[in-house]
Each structure stands twice: as structure tokens, then as C-alpha cells.
Amino acid sequence: MAALAALVGLGAMIFIGRRLSWGPVDKLPKNWADIGVNVWWVLPLALAVLPLFVWLDRSRSLPALILVLSGCGILVASYTSVAPTVVSGLFPTRVRATGVSLVYNAAITIFGGFAPAILSWFTAAAAGSVLAPAWYVALAAVTAIITIGFKRRQPAAREA
């Protein structure tokens, strides 16, 4: 029952986080949207996930579990709700559907499909540490920050 309560809190925070994150991004100029995604959504995720998991490991209580999952839910939801806009902006319209689908499916295959194996390896390498999922999320967030930082700045292409 405790896990169900935590998951309901997670689902509610994802729902709320996605609705709240669109407003600020829509107000940013298009060329600043990727910087906004880095500063306001990915960076807090990278910085907050490890302390949240450390607190959860030390407290080991239902309120802590609900708060940690809710906090992670807001951080992940706010990033994943605006990421498609940034990714679709990487491709010209004539190849946008193909480009986005290839990037999305490659990322899901690598980071989602291999997540159990990678987390098992992280856990074994860290002598059974329960912080392995936090390190995985932090490393994925840092990867996103670096990747978006290398995004080529280019003027908007004229549509034919």
C-alpha cells in the first residue's frame, strides 16, 4: 500500500509538472529555448537527484519516499515535457519526423533498454549501493546538458 501511495504521488506530480513547465518555455525566444531547458529543467534534475536519494536512504520512511518520488516526478516531467520541442527544432521540416523518430528510438533503446543492465552494473560496482539509480539519472542529465550545449546555432531555415 505504501508503494501505491508513492506512485500516486509520482503520477500526480508528473501531471502537474508537465502543465507548469510549458508556460515559461513558450515565453522564451526560440533560440533561447534550449538554454532554458538546460538551466531551468535539466540542471536542477542533475543537482537534486543524488541528495534526494541520500535523504531517502537515510530516512527510509513513507513520507520521505512520497516526497522524493514527487520531487523527481516534477523534475523529470518538466524536462520531458519540453524536450520534444527542442529535439524537433534540431531538424529541418523535410526530415523532422525521421530525425526525431531515429533520435528518440535510439535513446530509448540505449538508455531505457539497457537501464536494468547498467543499473545492475552500477550497483555491483558500488558494493550494493542504493544510490545507483540516482547516479544513473544524474549522468543522463549531464549527458543532456552537454548534448544541448553543443547544439549548432543556426538561423531559421526558410521553409519551401
Image (cartoon, rainbow, N blue to C red):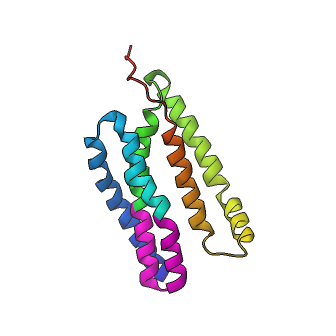
Looking at the rendering, in which quadrant would you find the C terminus? top left
**Total number of numbered labels?**
0
| Residue at screen point 63% across, 68% down | 132
Residue at 59% from the left image edge and 48% from the top image edge: 108
**Which of the two residues, 40 or 88, is positioned nearer the viewer here?**
40
Q: Is residue 126 magenta?
A: no
Residues in magenta, as a range: 48-74
Give me the residue at 45% from left, 55% from top. 43
| Residue 60 visible in the picture | no
Point 30% across, 48% down: residue: 22
* Residue 16 rendering spot, x and y as whole percentages: 32, 61
Q: Is residue 47 left or right of residue 160?
A: right
Is 62 part of what is drawn in magenta? yes
> Who is closer to the viewer here, 110 or 138?
138
Q: Specify whether residue 142 is in view.
A: yes
Q: Position of residue 100 (x, y in %)?
A: 51, 35
- Percent x, y of residue 138: 55, 60
Looking at the image, residue 18 sits to the left or right of residue 150; the answer is: left
69 lies above or below 85: below
Residue 91, compared with residue 58, is above or below; it is: above
Residue 64 located left or right of residue 101: left
Q: In the image, is residue 137 above or below residue 145?
A: below
Quarter-of-image position of residue 147: top right
**Residue furthest toward the top?**
160
- Residue 27 position in % (x across, y down): 25, 42
Q: Is residue 9 above or below residue 61?
A: above
Q: Main secondary structure of the magenta part?
A: helix
Tell which of 36 and 90 is nearer to you. 36
